[in-house]
Amino acid sequence: MRRPVKRKRADLAAFGGTPAFPEPLHVGRPNLPDRERLMERLADALERRRLTNDGPLTRELEDALAQRLGIRHCVSTCNATLALQLTARALGLRGEVIVPSFTFIATAQALAWEGIEPVFCDIRPDTHGIDPAHVARLVTPRTSAIVGVHLWGIPCDVEALAAIAGRRTLRVLYDAAHAFGCTHRGRPVGGFGDAEVFSFHATKYFHTLEGGAIATNDDALAIRLRRMRNHGFTGLDDVAELGTNAKMNEFSAAVGLTMLADVDAIVAVNRAHHERYRAALSGIPGLRLLDYDRGERANYQFVVAEIDAPAMGLQRDELVDILRFENVLARRYFHPGCHRLAPFRTLQPDARRSLPETERIAQRVLCLPTGPAVSDDDIDTIGEIIRVAARGDC
Ligand code: T4K
């Protein structure tokens, strides 16, 4: 079926036109593993009747990931949120921990769940990553760590954070939920700080349905994390310390192992889509597309636009609504910032005063659909819709 053309405002579905897409186009549409290979692995697992608790597929995935990331240990988990909690606890974090507010709520929740006070720091306008200068100003005698987030897969300024942490012997933990397959100065994300946490949630380009992993080069930390993720067990009936259940199951590991064969191809699609968006959106007033450093490896799993409302003649939220009428479900990640969400908005009502960039960017940001579920034509159509919406005069 031919797609409705969008040349003037009246063509837009929000103003009476026909929606461009008959079905919703999502941000975070899961990539699918090769079915045949996956079914083989699942059948093997069923045959073995080994379904969870450190099974052979989970170990195989951990080894494959550790090798790929060039790290000594990869501790798989059932999701990244619990992985962050485990690592915070295993590293002995307490008191205050400095963390950006501009992140998925899980980063701050994991700390708060462990009884830690997240102290929100601001971000850099160019990368939306943690601002080391602000971090340095927030360190107090109660600070035990810095949690950086490699937002959108763009690595933090790890050297600057390491320098700040080194002066006060603070721990450094990275939320690398977005950054699987990315590099910083040629080194894979996974080996920075005391540990790094990946999310393998279904919405990530590489996933295990639900899942996550902690990457570390610290042997003692890895042993502790493995113990803690399995209730603290050290033998069949001995528990050495407080633990929880944060294990990955064999079906998730089977998905991960199968997806791993395709990650490079998926990144190639993501990268081509990024270029296509760049062309489709070029010259639209008030729209800036966040870029990735061409000298590094990136996974391009997010297409992040910033909307300057006065220049575009349209508020970001109006654009989100216009796109929704067309069945394009753009997302306002990570509006409005953790500091404006419960419980932090009541616990820290003044936080917004010290977060001017977070406040500004949370009002402007927009993520557009990408990944193999999206076609070049889809991207061109999204570009047309935004161009017509931004012109607003026809
Ligand atoms: N740190 C950071 C920086 C993170 O971004 C995240 C997670 C975490 C930590 C914690 O990781 P995990 O504990 O989750 O491993 C989604 C994901 O649930 C979340 O994992 C992710 N970040 C976040 C950025 O996105 P929602 O609430 O936006 O998801 P939802 O249900 O709205 O799904 C997004 C879109 O994807 C929807 O339009 C529908 C589509 N979708 C989703 C699923 C799950 C599908 O088409 N099929 C599906 O199966 O949080």
Image (cartoon, grey):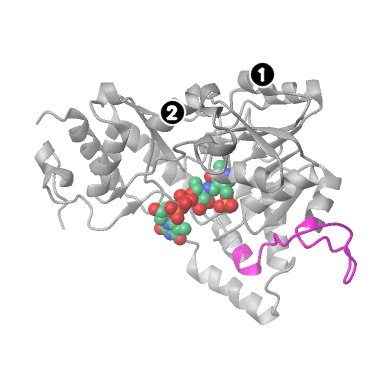
Q: In this image, 376 relative to 345: left or right?
A: left
Badge 2 marks a residue whose secondary structure is helix
Q: Which residues are magenta?
A: 228-253
Three-letter amino acid code of the residue under disc 1: Arg
Q: In this image, 149 relative to 204: left or right?
A: right
Q: Nearer the viewer, residue 320 or 371?
A: 320
Q: On the rendered image, what quadrant is the C terminus found in?
A: top left
Badge 1 marks a residue whose secondary structure is helix
Q: Which mark is residue 137?
A: 1
Three-letter amino acid code of the residue under disc 2: Ile
Mark before the other along the chain sequence, 2 or 1: 1
Residue 305 rendering spot, x and y as whole percentages: 38, 33
Residue 82 rendering spot, x and y as whole percentages: 66, 53
The answer to whether residue 373 is visible is yes
Res. 209 image quadrant: bottom right
**For residue 240, above or below residue 36:** above
Judging by the rendered image, the residue that carries numbered circle 2 is 361
